[in-house]
Amino acid sequence: MSQDTVSHIDVRSLFRPLDEALISLLKSLSADDWNKQTVAKKWKVKDVATHLLDGNIRALSIQRDKYFGEVPPQINGYSDMVNWLNQLNADWVNATKRISPSVLIFLHEFTGKETSTYFESLDLFEEAIFPVDWAGESVSYNWMHLAREYTEKWHHQQQIREAVGKEGIMTKQFYFPLIDTYFRALPNTFKDTQAETGTLIETTITSEIGGSWYLLKKEEKWELVSTADKEPDAKVELPAEVSWQLFSKNKRANEVINQIQLSGNTALAKQVLEMVSVMA
């Protein structure tokens, strides 16, 4: 069996075209579209668009300019961090309800270009300003930090596209880096799961824009490997359309289980479905 670990991800060249796709999408929306419900239960289309704007502003202010603005409360664990971020998100969305769609697009056009330029300038292997907590990392390199930022921009844009019925980023170019990043959370998902050394789990996104990912139990830990030369002990197959919603916690496994195929050790296979690749 191959022991090769998966390689790093470089998404720097994708921020600009993804942002251009977002601007074109927002400019195409009708007045009714802005008020349509998204799969994010608390947010309409305009709310998601303003959240994406907040992401740009935070990246430029905190990451590029090293300006934090406010001191976070005492954080005693992962749940405290999630609660604080959720409150920041809610405060921003509520405050920006007074912003018109045309002004929102204008702000996106400016901040999106600036954010892309900043992300493109980063050295992939320098230590990132923030670790990627959902991947179980206490320290991250910029390549993983940027991949996380990319998933945020992709999945929120896709929420808007699904709500208004417009395709555009469910392509190999844009989707594959998203799902490849999401699977970096799989070893952390299994960190407390007991299994014999050599146990192999295969997860396949059943689409030409997807692929297969392999999780191998080594002596001390679970690890993603690039290939495998044995039959998996557990196997999961799911469509691309389901995967992004499941792993970003827009939907849970019980809501989409009839679209997922499990085989082999079903307990291990079901554990894959618990992976969450966002702060939630």
Image (tube, rainbow, N blue to C red):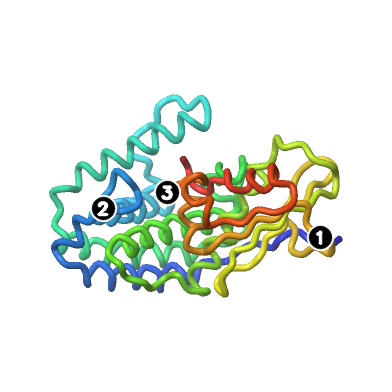
Q: Which x, y percent locates residue 221?
A: 77, 42
Q: Quadrant of residue 67?
A: top left
The earlier-in-sequence mark between 2 and 1 is 2
Residue type, numbered disc 1: Glu
Question: Circle 1 — which element?
Answer: loop
The earlier-in-sequence mark between 1 and 3 is 1
Q: Which x, y percent locates residue 101?
A: 17, 60
Q: Which mark is residue 250?
A: 3
Q: Which x, y percent locates residue 43?
A: 28, 48
Q: Which x, y percent locates residue 135?
A: 60, 46
Q: Quadrant of residue 159?
A: bottom left
Identify residue for label 2: 37
Residue type, numbered disc 3: Asn
The residue positioned 49% from the left and 51% from the top of the image is: 256
Report, in whole angstroms, how far the alpha carbon at label 3 lies from the one at label 2: 13 Å
Question: Circle 2 — which element?
Answer: loop
The residue positioned 78% from the left and 57% from the top of the image is: 232
Question: Callout 3: 10 Å neighbours few (<14), some, many (20+)?
Answer: some
Identify residue for label 1: 231
The earlier-in-sequence mark between 3 and 2 is 2
The residue positioned 52% from the left and 74% from the top of the image is: 172
